[in-house]
Image: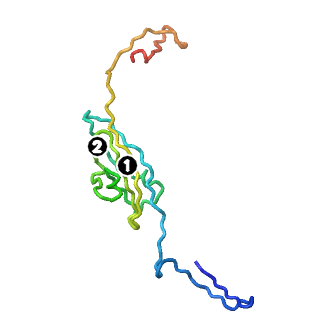
Amino acid sequence: MYIYIYIYIARKLLLMKKFILLVGFLLTTISLSAQVIANPAPDLSLCDVNNDGVEIFNLTVNDVAIIGSQDPVGLEVTYYESMADAQARINYIVNSSTYTSAGQQTIFARIEDLATGDYAVTDFELIVNPIPIDYGPFEMMLCDDELQGSTSTDTISTFDLTANN
């Protein structure tokens, strides 16, 4: 950036000097960078295959959503069990690709610019869903009908699948 100084005496230009403005204190330059954004991450859910209420989650599948359109170079995403830990950058989840969770749990993700130390935090839920009840196979039998343009000999029948609910 340049500053132009004009000195006028009796409406005549006597002196013009061009100064280069150095931004910063004591000739120190300040590096301006965009603030890091922790984009919202989707909740992760798994079916409880062992019916024990516990499942193993890969938290890192949310890295892409959290980083979003930011340049991932120089950014680090870490996961925490509490907001306080995420803000203090302590007790991060070491096994974030094989994290064991029981029931529903909130996870806090911290994205940090390693060059500046700038960071942001977002959160998402881990959900362990129970296995749906298996009612087993059932049979439905019906004689050949003449519904919806069918004939009595085309071996096509119309079934009401809500009948066995």
Q: Nearer the viewer, mark 1 or mark 2?
A: 2
Q: CA distance from mark 1 to mark 2?
A: 16 Å
Q: How is the image coloured?
A: rainbow
Q: Which residue of the protein is positioned furthest toward the right in this rendering?
A: 11
Residue at image coords 74%, 90%: 10
Residue at (27, 45) in percent of width and height: 100
Write down the quadrant of residue 38 in the picture.
bottom left
Foreground residue among 138 and 70: 70
Q: Looking at this view, is 65 or 155 the one in front? A: 65
Q: Is residue 79 above or below residue 1?
A: above
Instruction: Mark 1: give few (<14), some (14-19) or many (20+) Cα within 10 Å.
Output: some
Front residue (pair 65, 90): 90
Residue 78 in percent (x, y) is at 34, 55
Left/right placement of residue 84 relative to residue 65 reads: left
Q: Is residue 131 above or below residue 107?
A: above
Report which residue position mark 1 lands on: 61
What's under tag 2, amino acid-wise?
Ser
Which residue has dot 2 on it? 101
Give the mark nearer the N terminus: 1 vs 2. 1
Q: Amino acid at mark 1?
A: Val
- Farthest residue, direction front: 10
Rendered view: 42 above or below 19: above
Q: Is residue 68 left or right of residue 88?
A: right
Q: Residue at x 42, y 10 (%)?
A: 142
- Residue 134, given in percent of the width and then of the height, sits at 32, 24
Instruction: Check the picture and name the quadrant holding the N terminus.
Output: bottom right
Residue 85: image location, x then y, percent: 32, 55
